[in-house]
Image (spheres, helix red, strand yellow):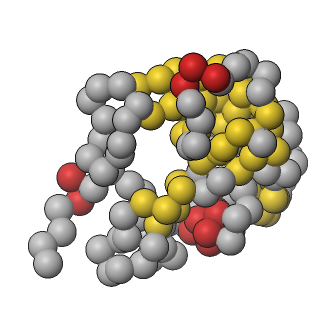
């Protein structure tokens, strides 16, 4: 099968492609994680291979709670990426002091409200070119 990277909307998540593969490994296991700088201790979102604060490339992985609240959201009804059914809800979720831009699943757009509690619900998307499953962070009403 031919593979065109330019038409693949999802990240390549394996250790061959990203030093942040641990994020996806934990996500597949139902855990939301991010990096903490090994030099200055800053918690990053999204996970980073180097610290934007002090420039260090030492980091440790930290699991987040998986429970958050909706800080803001928007509903996309047209122009959805291939493979997504609409309407699609995107939300900024406040979780452990971070603001995580994510997809909201199993949510009726007219019943969503700012401040509503949500729980991590990783979303399986198209497999990578080698057939390994891929996951994106997503939340559903708690
Ligand atoms: Zn740092």
- Up-down relation of residue 17 to residue 58 (above or below): below
Q: Is residue 101 left or right of residue 127?
A: right
Residue 55 screen position, x and y as percent: 68, 45
Along the line of sight, the residue nearer the viewer: 141 or 95: 141
- Up-down relation of residue 18 to residue 107 (above or below): below
Name the residue rendered at 65%, 24% in the picture.
112
Q: Is residue 102 left or right of residue 115?
A: left
Residue 57 screen position, x and y as percent: 68, 57
Q: Image quadrant of residue 96? A: top right
Q: Image quadrant of residue 80? A: top left
User: Does residue 64 show up?
Assistant: yes
Q: Is residue 114 left or right of residue 3?
A: right
Of the 4 image quadrants, the one containing the C terminus is: top right
In the rendered image, the residue lying farthest to the left is: 2
Q: Image quadrant of residue 4? A: bottom left
Name the residue rendered at 61%, 69% in the picture.
28
Residue 52 screen position, x and y as percent: 67, 39
Residue 56 screen position, x and y as percent: 72, 52
């Amino acid at each position: 099968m031919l593979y065109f990277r330019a038409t693949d909307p999802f990240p390549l998540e394996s250790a061959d492609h990203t030093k942040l593969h641990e994020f996806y490994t934990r996500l597949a296991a139902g855990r939301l994680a991010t990096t903490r700088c090994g030099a200055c201790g800053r918690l990053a979102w999204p996970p980073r291979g180097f610290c934007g604060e002090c420039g260090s490339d030492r980091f440790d992985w930290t699991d987040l709670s998986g429970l958050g609240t909706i800080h803001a959201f928007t509903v996309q009804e047209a122009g959805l990426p291939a493979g997504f059914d609409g309407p699609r809800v995107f939300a900024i979720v406040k979780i452990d002091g971070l603001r995580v831009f994510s997809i909201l699943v199993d949510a009726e757009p007219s019943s969503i409200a700012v401040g509503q509690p949500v729980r991590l619900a990783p979303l399986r998307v198209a497999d990578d070119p080698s057939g390994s499953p891929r996951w994106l962070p997503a939340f559903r009403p708690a």
